[in-house]
Amino acid sequence: MRGIAPVLTDYAQQGQRARVEDFFQRMSADGTNGALLKANGELWYAAHDFPNELIVTATRTIVNGDSLEFEQRVGDRYWFCLIRPLSARQQIGYLVVANDWTNIGETLREKMLLPIGAALIVMALTAVLIPMAVRLYVSKPLAELSRRVMRFSTDNEIASEAGDELKLLDDEFQRLDRQLTIAHAELLARHRYELELNRRLQRADRLATIGTLASGLAHEIGTPMGVMRTRTELLLQGRPTPEKAREGLEIIHGQIERITKIVTMLLDYARGRESRRVRYDLGTIIEHVLKLVEAQAKRSNVRIVLEPNAERLMVQCDPDQLQQVFVNLAINAFDAMAPDGGTLTVNSSIDHKRNFSLVRVSFQDTGCGVPAEFRDRLFDPFFTTKPPGKGTGMGLSVSQSIIRDHRGELTFEAEASGARFSVELPMTQAYLASDESGVAQMERPR
């Protein structure tokens, strides 16, 4: 209506009645009737089918200054009217537009009938389908679940009303909870037993290794004992000068220190300790192990070659357990090279990966090697290729268990002459703190 008013204002000022008539006829084609009133409320022009009753009401509305819109029934028709002032420099009249709202109610009813009908159909289908879906996808699966859960119950007494699947499930889940709690406690107890058994196996393997080491150390102890006996007899039989007596006592003292060191190493290796993890340099452990097996190497006519490595091989480990692994690998190498002897080469390296680094320690011997048919069973418990009385078959199995517990891996490689066993462990990036003199503080194996 805001767009119509300026156009009709121009037509009215110019007295172009024909254009106004043509304009209203086009409006009538869209179902809207129009009329023009003068400034004093008199009719200037109206469409041929514009009801006179509406003109009278519009004139009265303008004169009374009431609202510029109104609704009125004329005969069997219902009209909605809008009045818009026409003004240029001054007010020249009013535009009255009337819309026939007689069929609006029927139209609305027709338009609402389809959505309401569709909604009723949907509600009816929902009322039918939801119970069916609940029965098919909830009740039946729930009943089947209840039936299957009951199979797990060891309680013969089932207190549940017929058809009450939720109550039945609640009862069964409570029974399962009690059973799982008992099973969890049993698993914990079994786990503790297996840990204790593993510790005992490690201890047994260590004691078996001690027997092997003791035979070699007995010879080492016998030599200084013979020197001590000879020097003591010389001191007792003659009257040596103070210088000779002092020299003899110094020799005796040195040999006693040697025996003490040998026995201490053996006792420290035999002593059982609680597992502990610390940052440690593998190079220190390797050096200590080679000193411990030095007597056995001489007895087996084996030459030990330790390839130098200037890098710090820092790992998070239990030094005592890794010492046990390295002793096992060294003793196995000695046995593999018996009786003719050979060379044991020990080397270490760092394998730098993308996000981490691995420390690799290898023991390579020049012995007889491992037959192909036995290689898949090397790490099986109680499996051994040694003669009866020479081994328990637990050394490699226990060693592999220790290395895996350290998040590493113990591997075997067949060489052209002999065999190579390698230990791989994750390297730590943190280093031990240094004291003021710059010497790293580190606990060494006893």
Image: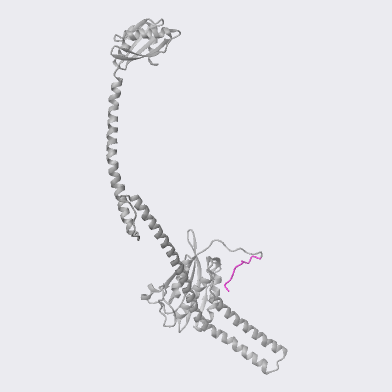
| The N terminus lies in quadrant | top left
- Is 440 a magenta residue? yes
- The residue range painted magenta reads 437-446
List x then y, in percent, for residue 284. 56, 71
Q: For this rendering, which residue is in front, 425 or 123?
A: 123
Visible in this render: residue 92? no
Visible in this render: residue 14? yes
Q: Is residue 142 above or below residue 341?
A: above
Horizontal side, residue 144 vs residue 187: left or right: left
Residue found at the far right of this picture: 242
Q: Main secondary structure of the magenta part?
A: loop
List x then y, in percent, for residue 126. 29, 38
Q: Is residue 330 above or below residue 221?
A: above
List x then y, in percent, for residue 376. 38, 72
Q: For this rendering, which residue is in front, 287 or 367?
A: 287
- Is 387 a magenta residue? no
Residue found at the far bottom of this picture: 237
List x then y, in percent, for residue 239. 70, 94
Q: Is residue 192 above or below residue 384?
A: above
